[in-house]
Amino acid sequence: MPIVEQSPVHHHHHHGHGHQTFYHQQSIPEQTGKMQLTLILPNGVPSVITVDANTPMMDLLVQAASLNKLNPSGYSLVVLDSNQHVIHFKANQTVGQIVKSCHLPQINGNL
């Protein structure tokens, strides 16, 4: 799913280091509208999070940061496809829209 990367103090994006990854592991039955993601935290420990497919990307960042006691203002979401290419998105796009637009069973993301 989305990738959350640590934001440098000067607010420019650096994609070369400090990435952790969200894996869109499985969809819980589609009618529930829920998606289960595995978030790899900055310390390398995986954490499973279940979100609504209609969750905007910015809300996902806030939820993931909150669950893991991170300050969301210090991080930004970066979505990677299976080839590790960055997928551009708007903060108000939903998790489900990103998955559909990529046509991928798995989306990598960093926090």
Image: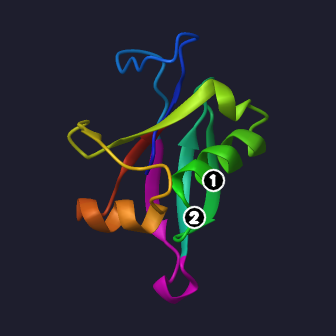
Asked if 51 appears above or below 76 in the picture, the reply is below
Asked if 70 appears above or below 29 in the picture, the reply is above
Q: Which mark is residue 55?
A: 2
Bounds of the magenta segment: 22-33
Q: Position of residue 73 (x, y in %)?
A: 67, 29
Q: Is residue 30 magenta?
A: yes
Q: Is residue 63 magenta?
A: no
Identify which residue is drawn at 27% across, 46% down: 81
The amino acid pointed to by label 1 is: Asp
The amino acid pointed to by label 2 is: Thr
Q: Which mark is residue 9?
A: none
Judge by depth and name the residue closer to the eye, 48 or 81: 81
Identify which residue is drawn at 20% across, 40% down: 83
Q: Quadrant of residue 54?
A: bottom right
Q: Is residue 22 left or right of residue 66?
A: left
Q: Residues within 10 Å of mark 2 (few under 14, many from 20)?
A: many
Q: Which mark is residue 59?
A: 1
Q: Quadrant of residue 109?
A: top left
Q: Position of residue 30 (x, y in %)?
A: 47, 83
Q: Position of residue 42 (x, y in %)?
A: 60, 25
Identify which residue is drawn at 53% across, 76% down: 28
Q: Position of residue 20 (x, y in %)?
A: 49, 30
Q: Mark 2 touching mark 1, by CB under 8 A?
A: yes
Q: How is the image coloured?
A: rainbow
